[in-house]
């Protein structure tokens, strides 16, 4: 229609200037053109009706714009690490630009004790140090002590994203001296890589997961508790059974009563193994052995050597969801240095009246029972017995038998704070039959950053 209108206008303009016959010819041409245009329009309409409607285009994701900045190159030949995964345990933090996670734990504590007499050690309840009845040390009334020597600091570093289960562990407390408060003491410093452990930590003769839950920092007399420089190799037999082999620095304790010039000698490391059954929620059992060479020499006894050996069996069994039973039995000769209590005396070996060196027989047993009254309250009873044979060449006050008993009630306000009260009784008997004992009441405040 627009084309036709334009032609009409043009025609109207030209009619004023053209002659009549020319006007007639032009009108005829315009009519023919108009008919042709109308025919084309009709054809276009028919074609548009027959053509199918195209589908709507699908939405497609827009490709991200590539980062024009390349990643930083490796530094000094070391790979640039991606951030490690979420730490596997509560309290672990990722160290930037490394595969490591680390946890710092601080455990301050305060122990307040009241003793019926002189306990021999104002900081820990050590039955081997109880003064004998009738001595000046035993005389006197009750005594009160405060200390924080059991406070601990530890670091645990792991690499959960790397092969080998790499680990570095450090811990100290403040029992470096029994005559002063807060003296630094290293408890553990070791490394793990795959199945190999090396450093300063607990002997393989020790079941560190089977100590009764006492407030007394020293703990039951009858458990094996020794830390030393060592190398251990552990591997799993299956999901429940594990075996550990190791060699360790020997700590030899020989009674020098017969000859004050006696000095100990070490010619081979202590060697042993343990077998552990881990029953998960049912508890665990550990069987251990240790073999050692005990040597000493003196002016009157010469250079002598005896063989030491020991076996122990320990178990922590979940009797119910609220109760745990712990037991420990040890038997051997020349292993007094491994005992939690006997290691305070020279109890590995001693000379008889003829100057002959003997490995001293060692027997000990422990029972502990923990009951959880509810999520916040728990109690533990424990008893320990140690017996070491004596030779006729030892002094009358040589270590012979000790007894240890404890009962406590602990309230756990939250994961960071607990308070508890404990009653303790200890008795020491020596070679000539004399004894000394003590009652202690202890109140403890226990803090920690993490479990």
Image (cartoon, rainbow, N blue to C red):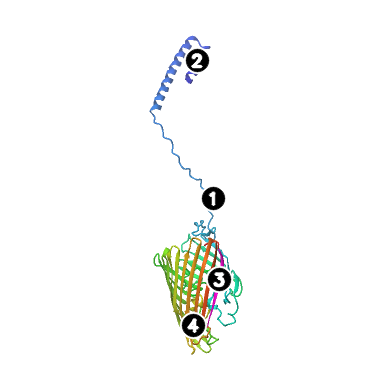
Quarter of image, res 32: top left
Foreground mark, 4 or 3? 3
Dot 1, crowdedness within 10 Å: few (<14), some or many (≥20)?
Answer: few
Dot 3, crowdedness within 10 Å: few (<14), some or many (≥20)?
Answer: some
Q: Position of residue 103 (x, y in %)?
A: 53, 62
Dot 2, crowdedness within 10 Å: few (<14), some or many (≥20)?
Answer: some
Disc 1 target residue: 69
Residue 441 lies in the magenta stretch: yes
Foreground mark, 2 or 4? 4
- Mark with earlier residue (1, 2): 2
Q: Is residue 249 visible?
A: no
Residue sitting at 52 percent across and 74 percent down?
A: 425
Residue span colored magenta: 434-447
Disc 4 target residue: 349
Cα–Cα span, label 4 and label 3:
35 Å
- Mark with earlier residue (2, 4): 2
Q: Position of residue 446 (x, y in %)?
A: 56, 65
Q: Is residue 247 visible?
A: yes
Disc 3 target residue: 441
The answer to which of 59 and 332 lies nearer the viewer is 332
Cα–Cα span, label 2 and label 4:
139 Å
Disc 2 target residue: 11
Residue 376 lies in the magenta stretch: no
Would you say the residues marked 1 and 2 are in contact, meaning their CB atoms lie under 8 Å apart?
Answer: no
Q: Position of residue 410 (x, y in %)?
A: 52, 65
- Mark with earlier residue (2, 3): 2
Q: Position of residue 208 (x, y in %)?
A: 48, 70
The answer to which of 55 and 262 lies nearer the viewer is 262
């Amino acid at each position: 229609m627009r084309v036709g209108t334009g032609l009409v206008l043009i025609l109207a303009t030209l009619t004023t200037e053209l002659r009549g016959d020319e006007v007639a010819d032009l009108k005829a041409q315009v009519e023919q053109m108009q008919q042709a245009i109308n025919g084309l329009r009709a054809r276009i309409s028919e074609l548009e009706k027959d053509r199918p409607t195209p589908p709507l285009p699908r939405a497609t994701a827009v490709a991200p714009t590539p980062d024009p900045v390349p990643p930083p190159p490796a530094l000094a030949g070391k790979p640039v690490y991606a951030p490690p995964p979420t730490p596997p345990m509560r309290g672990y933090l990722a160290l930037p630009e490394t595969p490591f996670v680390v946890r710092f734990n601080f455990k301050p504590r305060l122990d307040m004790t009241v003793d019926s007499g002189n306990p021999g050690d104002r900081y820990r309840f050590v039955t081997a140090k109880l003064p004998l009845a009738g001595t000046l040390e035993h005389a006197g009334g009750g005594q009160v002590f405060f200390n924080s020597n059991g406070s601990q600091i530890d670091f645990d570093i792991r690499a959960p994203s790397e092969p080998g289960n790499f680990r570095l562990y450090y811990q100290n407390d403040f029992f470096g001296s029994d005559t002063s408060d807060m003296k630094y003491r290293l408890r553990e410093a070791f490394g793990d890589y795959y199945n190999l452990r090396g450093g300063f930590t607990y002997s393989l003769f020790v079941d560190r997961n089977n100590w009764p839950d006492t407030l007394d920092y020293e703990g039951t007399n009858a458990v094996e508790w020794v830390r030393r420089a060592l190398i251990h190799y552990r591997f799993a037999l299956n999901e429940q059974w594990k075996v550990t082999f190791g060699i360790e620095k020997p700590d030899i304790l020989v009674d020098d009563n017969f000859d004050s010039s006696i000095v100990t000698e070490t010619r081979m490391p202590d060697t042993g193994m343990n077998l552990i059954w881990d029953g998960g929620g049912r508890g665990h059992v550990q069987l251990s052995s240790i073999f050692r060479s005990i040597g000493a020499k003196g002016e009157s006894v010469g250079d002598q050597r005896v063989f030491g050996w020991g076996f122990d069996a320990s178990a922590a069994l979940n009797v119910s969801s609220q109760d745990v039973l712990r037991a420990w039995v040890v038997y051997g000769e020349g292993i007094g240095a491994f005992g939690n209590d006997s290691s305070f005396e020279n109890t590995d070996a001693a000379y008889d009246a003829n100057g002959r060196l003997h490995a001293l027989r060692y027997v000990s047993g422990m029972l502990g029972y923990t009951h959880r009254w509810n999520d916040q309250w728990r109690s533990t009873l424990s008893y320990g017995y140690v017996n070491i044979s004596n030779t006729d060449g030892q002094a009358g006050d040589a270590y012979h038998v000790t007894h240890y008993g404890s009962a406590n009630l602990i309230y756990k306000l939250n994961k960071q704070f607990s308070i508890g009260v404990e009653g303790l009784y200890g008795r020491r008997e020596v070679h000539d039959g004399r004894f000394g004992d003590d009652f202690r009441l202890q109140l403890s405040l226990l803090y920690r950053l993490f479990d």
